Amino acid sequence: MSSGIDILLIEDEPNIAEAIQFILSRDGWRVEHWSEGGDAMARIRQHLPRLIILDVMLPVRSGLEVLEDLRKVKKVSHTPVLLLTARGTGGNGGISAGSADRILSKPFDNAELRQVVHEILGAKG
């Protein structure tokens, strides 16, 4: 059953989560926050978000493990995923998008976050 949210944010850093919620809520998006990867799939199934913003480094289960599970569940497998990483996205030590739709490196620019969400979900309102 969908709870009518647009974005499920799975981020364990409170300051980052608060900032993302503020930025996207101000743009009219309905954002639900969850802070760990262990029960992430249950949250995703419960809320059926239009977009998942997923931190790579999470307690209990990593964002990459959550993403791998997500892509195996038919009901939610096509949900767009924006990965957030402090590791960087290129060169040595970087991560690749894999089955994520986009990656943003922390720290990211607020305007860049808004642009990526707009590109994935379209204009709000």
Image (cartoon, rainbow, N blue to C red):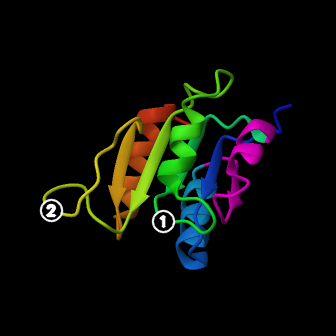
> In the image as oriented, which residue stretches furthest toward the left?
91
User: Residue 4, can we see it?
Assistant: no
Amino acid type shown at disc 1? Met
Task: Give amino acid for label 2.
Answer: Asn
- Magenta-colored stretch includes residue 36: yes
**Mark 2 and mark 1: Cα distance apart in space:** 18 Å
Residue 123 or residue 13, whichever sits in front: 13
Q: Which residue lies furthest to the bottom in this view?
A: 15
Q: Which residue is drawn at 29% across and 54% down?
A: 95
The image quadrant where one finds the C terminus is: top right
91 sits to left or right of 44: left
**Where 28 sits versus 78, above or below?**
below
Give the secondary structure at mark 2. loop
Q: Which residue is rendered at x = 73% and y = 54% of the image?
A: 39
Q: Residue 57 carries which label?
A: 1
Is the C-beta separation of discs 2 and 1 under 8 Å? Answer: no
Residue 30 to residue 80: above or below: below
Q: Mark 2 points at which residue?
A: 92
Q: Is residue 46 left or right of residue 21?
A: right
Looking at the picture, how far across and down is residue 44, in whole percent?
71, 41
Q: Label 1 crowding class (10 Å Cα cut-off): few <14, some 14-19, many 20+?
A: some
Say above or below: 19 vs 112.
Answer: below
Q: Visible in this render: residue 34?
A: yes
Residue 83 sits inside the magenta stretch:
no
Q: Which mark is residue 34?
A: none
Which segment is the magenta one?
Answer: 28-46
Identified at 24% across, 59% down, the residue is: 94
Quarter assignment of residue 36: bottom right
Q: Which quadrant of the structure image shows residue 38?
A: bottom right
| Residue sitting farthest toward the top | 74
Dot 2 or dot 1: first in sequence order is: 1
